[in-house]
Amino acid sequence: MKRELDNLVTQMHAGGITYDEAVREFKRRFILEVLAGHRGNQCKAAKELGVHRNTLSRILAELKIDPAQVRTGLRRPPRSAGIDYGAKQGAR
């Protein structure tokens, strides 16, 4: 993993990514991963991240992350949005 991180840092530096951009993107992806792991539950995510729930809310606002979208993205589509098999085989 260290080698992968070293390669990523080298690529980012060569690509002209600033430190602030790199830190922001890392925070964003890390927090999204933890939130998704807890199905959007901010209390559980905050506990795992080792921050207070209010601090996590502030960070989400700063990074423009909508926890409702994280929860929505994890849901299965409703049955009414199922596949139209007739359209695949040609409507009769």
Image: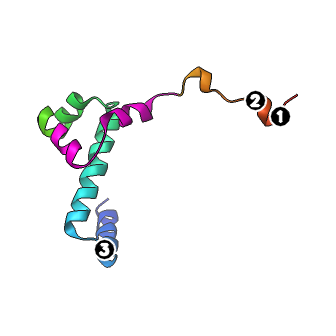
Q: Quadrant of the rendered structure where residue 45 is? A: top left
Q: Is residue 91 left or right of residue 67?
A: right
Residue 68 on the magenta segment? yes
Q: Give the magenta part as a residue range.
A: 57-76
Please tell me in which quadrant of the rendered image residue 77 appears. top right
On the picture, is 72 further left or further right than 30? right
Q: Give the residue furthest to the top.
A: 79
Q: Front-most of 41 and 92? A: 92
**Residue corresponding to mark 1:** 89
- Tell me the residue that label 3 is attached to: 10
- Residue drawn at (20%, 64%) of the image: 20
Distance (Cα) linking label 1 and label 2 = 7 Å
Front label number (3 vs 2): 2
Asked if disc 1 and disc 2 are in contact, CB closer than 8 Å, the reply is yes
Q: Specify the amino acid type for callout 1.
A: Gln
Report the disc number at residue 55.
Answer: none
Q: What element carries label 2?
A: helix
Question: Is the magenta region chiefly helix, strand or loop?
Answer: helix
Q: Mark 2 points at which residue?
A: 85
**Quarter of the figure that contains the C terminus:** top right
